[in-house]
Amino acid sequence: MSVAGAGLEGGVSVRLTTADGRVRAVSVQVRRPAAARALCGRTPEEAMRLVPLLFSLCGTAQSLAAAEALEGALGLNARPHAPARALLADAEAATNHAWQVLIDWPARLGEAPRPRELAALRAAAAALHPALYPARDGLRPGGGSLRPDRAALAAAIAALREGVERTVFAAPFPTDAAELERWAGAAGTPAARLMRRVLAPDMAGFGACRVPALEPHPAGWFGERLSADAAFSEFPRQDGAPAHTGPLARRSAHPLVAALLSTHGPGLAAHAAARLVELADLAKRLASQADRLKDAEPASDPGRTGHGVGSGAVETARGRLAHWLRLDNGRIADCRIVAPTEWNFAADGPLAAGLAGAAADEGLAERAGLLVAALDPCVASTITIQNED
């Protein structure tokens, strides 16, 4: 049997072979267009115009990673723009989490998705860029002319926060496992109903494995590995082994997530709770980030000749994203990207390890689909289950 489908933009194919009531073999294959190759041969300006077109789901994060890499290669100091960039990246991450919670989760429950609510959150997030950079020039190497409009920022952040609180939680977000069970049991929103489902005994620990979390390595750590080995883009390793990245990797120390990890391990319940914890936190911390903003000018050109290397790293909803590139004569001669999908859907990564040996009963397709969604590929996915009995 097959579940879901892969589109022309690429896909993740998961093939499970079952026998004697268990998953005996797992094959995970990622097929993605060579987007980094499309940036080679282009000037920095051309590349920055192209990046958001190549990466529609996380165009802001991809643009920020590319800009940071170009700044390293060009010797530009854009540190004064860091608070504004963090605000933009977090707002995009919040809306990507919201897509999962308002579109994907209801569909998995057999309910109608909530596109209107998602559109309102995206509109609020989109209002942040012009409220920070009136000329809409913030996503470029060196930054733009940062002139925060405090009133517009406050209105957009309030709309985003209130929208998340109303549509996702509809109540104060739980702070411990007991509150989580009560909130989920009340089933007031699709998020609560999905959480109730994954807290069930047959779900909570599904997918738990021993693949470690990806550490929050700096951009240089990725740059060293990407520059030394082009294969790192497709087959990344941490200390010679696979790793998982995303909400669970970042939020494992949160008391609520830690309690679920202690009880069920890093399975579906911990993954879902970590996403909700992060979404609630992102929606709240945007205001504190806005308080730290100051006016800033674009970074001044140090007069380099267009030769150099640089790397950039940004946290996205799906995990840690990194770019590395090399400039020759003012053009990108080489560019390499490692995205969260390559970590989470490696052939021996957390998905494959979490599915190996799982019970092959009538609920396997649903549980496997939920685990794929929890690890959150940025492309469509297909799950095929073949029973050898």
Image (cartoon, rainbow, N blue to C red):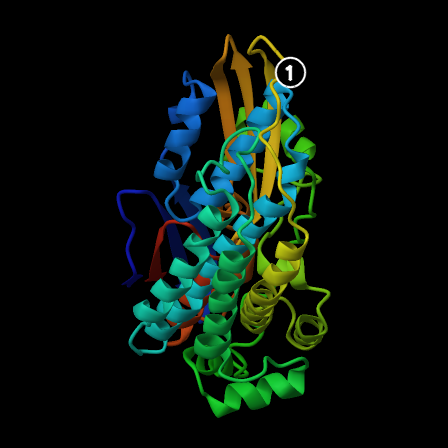
Most foreground residue, 135 or 384 = 135
Residue 387 position, x and y percent, is 35, 64
Quadrant containing the C terminus in the rendered view: bottom left
Snapshot quadrant of residue 48: top left
Q: Is residue 306 left or right of residue 15?
A: right
Q: Secondary structure at mark 1?
A: loop
Q: Is residue 271 above or below residue 59?
A: below
Most foreground residue, 296 or 28 = 296
- Does residue 377 appear in this view? yes
How packed mark 1 is, by other alpha carbons closer than 10 Å (few <14, some 14-19, many 20 or more), is few
Give the mark count. 1
Q: Is residue 192 above or below residue 149?
A: below
Snapshot quadrant of residue 295: top right
Q: Amino acid at mark 1?
A: Pro
Most foreground residue, 4 or 332 = 332
- What residue did someone put label 1 on? 302
Snapshot quadrant of residue 300: top right
Q: Is residue 124 above or below residue 84?
A: below
Residue displayed at 53% across by 15% down? 327
Q: Is residue 222 left or right of residue 162?
A: right
Residue 287 position, x and y percent, is 61, 62
Q: Is residue 180 left or right of residue 159?
A: right
- Does residue 210 appear in this view? no
Residue 313 position, x and y percent, is 60, 39
Most foreground residue, 382 or 142 = 142
Residue displayed at 56% across by 74% down? 269
